[in-house]
Image (tube, rainbow, N blue to C red):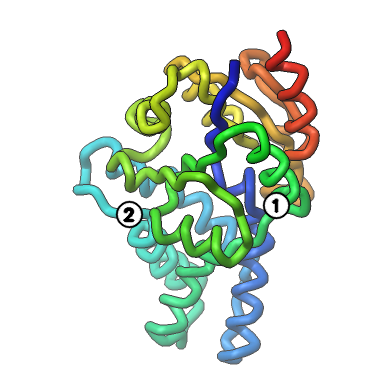
């Protein structure tokens, strides 16, 4: 019996790519400084896992995702030859990750799911990032669990098992909801239940991966509203 849902956030709950590109375009309008913003956004995301891996592998002390994101952003701006941004422009753009917009079904679906289950984040984003996003976008979390909560980034076991421990539930009573099979398989490895939600354009219209659930995933849904219906059936098994 599933008693609690924990959610990956970037890509699963919110549309990071369109949101960041939109923030970049606003920055261009405000500063007159132009750039290849789609490329910057994609490169920024490509730096996400490698930057966290340096922390996970013990090659640098713990820092939160805002710090890693800013370091990556400064490097990418230099690589793309985008010059002239002031420190406050860079800081504001870095905080775009606090303002990501939800997918169309996210708020409705989360409220539906909250009517029957505890719902919490389990994100590599920092606590303030997730809190700011929740307030701005009306995401109705019961709890905010972050890599910062456990001082470990996913897919370290301390994140998945730590969330179950915080909820005082067995791992199998907790279901990770994500649009990414890699995340789900890691949670499955440590005994959690799993649900795949399709986000077919997370990486743009030519996305060719994470278009269906791995066979080891317990539940597969088209969106959060569909997930609510699927879980009703799953919990009756």
Residue 120 lies, with reference to residue 235, above or below; the image says below
In the image, residue 209 lies at what x, y percent? 69, 34
* 3D distance between C-alphas at marks 2 and 1: 26 Å
Which corner quadrant of the image does residue 215 belong to?
top right
Residue at 40% x, 45% y: name it. 146
Please tell me the numbered disc located at residue 107.
Answer: 1
Q: Can the viewer see residue 43 in this picture?
A: yes
Please tell me which of labels 2 and 1 falls first in the chain. Answer: 2
Query: Relative to the observer, which residue lies in front, 163 or 77?
Result: 163
14 w.r.t. 224: above or below: below
Mark 2 vs mark 1, foreground winner is 1
- Locate residue 171 relative to residue 55 in the image: left or right: right
Which residue is depicted at the point 72% across and 12% down?
Answer: 236
Element type at mark 1: helix
Give the labeled residue for mark 2: 64
Lateral position of residue 169 relative to residue 23, left or right: left
Helix, strand or loop at mark 2: loop
Q: Is residue 20 above or below residue 127?
A: below
Whole-percent x, y for residue 17 in the image = 64, 58
Q: Quadrant of the N terminus?
A: top right
**Residue 166 falls left or right of residue 212:** left
**Dot 1 crowding, Cα within 10 Å, few <14, some 14–19, many 20+:** some
Q: What residue is drawn where x is 57% and y is 86%? A: 33
């Amino acid at each position: 019996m599933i008693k609690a849902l924990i959610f990956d956030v970037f890509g699963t709950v919110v549309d990071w790519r369109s949101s960041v590109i939109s923030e970049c375009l606003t920055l261009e309008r405000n500063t007159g400084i132009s750039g290849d913003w789609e490329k910057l956004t994609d490169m920024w995301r490509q730096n996400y896992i490698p930057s966290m891996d340096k922390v996970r592998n013990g090659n640098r002390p713990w820092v939160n995702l805002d710090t890693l994101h800013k370091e990556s952003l400064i490097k990418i701006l230099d690589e793309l030859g985008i010059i002239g941004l002031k420190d406050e422009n860079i800081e504001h753009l870095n905080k775009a990750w606090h303002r990501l917009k939800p997918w169309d079904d996210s708020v409705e679906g989360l409220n539906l799911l909250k009517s029957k289950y505890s719902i919490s984040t389990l994100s590599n984003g920092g606590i303030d990032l997730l809190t700011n996003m929740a307030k701005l976008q009306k995401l109705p979390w019961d709890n905010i669990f972050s890599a910062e909560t456990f001082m470990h980034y996913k897919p370290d076991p301390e994140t998945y098992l730590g969330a179950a421990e915080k909820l005082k539930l067995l791992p199998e009573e907790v279901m990770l909801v994500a649009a990414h099979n890699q995340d789900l398989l890691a949670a499955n490895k440590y005994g959690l239940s799993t649900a795949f939600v399709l986000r077919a354009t997370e990486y743009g219209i030519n996305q060719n991966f994470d278009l269906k659930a791995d066979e080891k995933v317990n539940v597969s849904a088209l969106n959060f509203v569909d997930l609510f219906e699927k879980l009703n059936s799953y919990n009756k098994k």
